[in-house]
Amino acid sequence: MDSALGTVALPAALAVIMFGLGLSLTVDDFVRVTRRPRAAVVALGLQLLVLPAVCFGLVTLAGLEPVLAVGMVLLAASPGGTTANLFSHLFRGDVALNVSLTAVNSLLAVVTLPLVTNLAVEVFDPPGAGSIGLQFGKTVQVFAIVLVPVALGMLVRRTAPAFADRMDRPVRVLSAVVLALVIVGTVVAERESVGGYLREVGLVALAFCVLSLLLGFAVPRALGIGHRQAVACCFEIGVHNSTLAIAVAISVLGSVELAVPAAVYGVLMFPVAALVGWAVTRSARSSAEEPAVR
C-alpha cells in the first residue's frame, strides 16, 4: 500500500472514527458499568478471553497461513466498533450498555490488543515475526491512535455539548464511509492475491463472525441477563472495530496482508449482524406471544 496512505490517510481516518466515538461519550458512561456489573463483566469476559481463544481454535483448525492467522487474532482482540451501537438501537438492545462497553473496551484494548497479538505472533511465527510484534514503541502508537482522538472528542462533548449532538449523525455517516474506503483500499492494495485470500480466510471470518454474535447473545441469556442487555452484548462482541485492526496492521505493523482478515470481516459482519439481529428479535417476539401454560 502507498506509504502516504499507510502513514497519513489511514491513521487520520481512524482518528475521525475514534473522535466520533468520543463525541458520544461522557465520564458517566465509564461509571455506568459499575452500576450494571453483571452484564458488563460477562460481556468483557467474552470479549477479552473467550473470543481470542475461539479465534485461535478456528485458525488452527483451518490451517491458515501464519500471517493471516495473526491477522484474524488481531481482529478478535480489537474492541467493539461504534456500529454496534447502531445495530443495538435497531434491534432494541440496551444502547447505553453498548456505549459503556465500547468506552471500556477501547480503553482496555490499549493493553489487551498488544498482548493477544504478540501471543499470536509467538504461536504462529509468521515470516518477519520481529517486525510484526507490538513492542513498546508500537504499543505507544496504538495508544495514540485509539485514546487521544477519543479523549479529544470527550473534551468537545464536555465543553460544547450542543455542537457534539449536532455532529453525532454526520460523524457516524462519515465513519461508515471511511470504513468502506479503508476496506476497498486494503482489497485494492492486495488485488493480485485477493482471490486466494478470500478463499483461505473467508469461511474462517464468516464462522468467527457468526460465533461471536451467537455467543454474545446466548451466554448472557444463559446466565440470566435480560433480553435487551443480551442484545447489546451480542452486537458489542460481534461487531468488531475493523478499522482499528486494519490501521494497526498497516500503519503500526507495516503489513497489508495482516489487514486482510479484518477487511474481509468488515464486509461480512454487516449482513450477518443484521440477520442475527432479525432472528433474535423474531425469537423474542415469538416467545412473548406464546400462551401461558395453565
Image: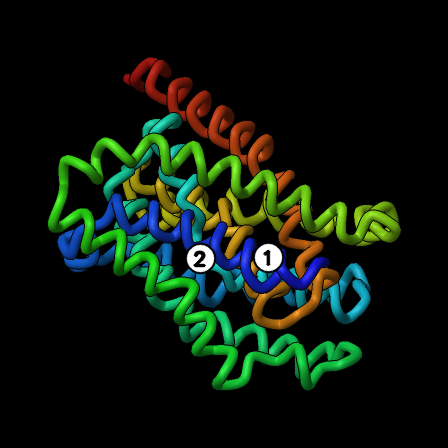
Mark 1 or 2 closer to N-term? Answer: 2
The answer, for residue 50, to whether it is visible in the render is: yes
Residue at left offset 71%, top offset 55%? 260
- Say the numbered circle drawn on residue 107: none
Residue at left offset 14%, top offset 35%? 162
Q: Which residue is mark 2?
A: 79
**Helix, strand or loop status at disc 1:** helix
Q: Position of residue 271 (x, y in %)?
A: 59, 30
Display coloring: rainbow
The crowding category of the residue bearing disc 2, from other C-alpha atoms within 10 Å (few below 14, some 14 to 19, many at least 20), is: many
Residue type (three-letter) at the residue carrying disc 1: Ile
CA–CA distance between discs 1 and 2?
A: 13 Å
Residue type (three-letter) at the residue carrying disc 2: Pro
Q: Nearer the viewer, residue 289 or 294?
A: 289
User: Is 138 left or right of 109, judged from the image as shown?
Assistant: right
Q: Nearer the viewer, residue 290 or 88?
A: 88
Extreme residue toward the front, this view: 4
The crowding category of the residue bearing disc 1, from other C-alpha atoms within 10 Å (few below 14, some 14 to 19, many at least 20), is: many
- Say the numbered circle drawn on residue 246: 1
Quadrant hosting residue 112: bottom left
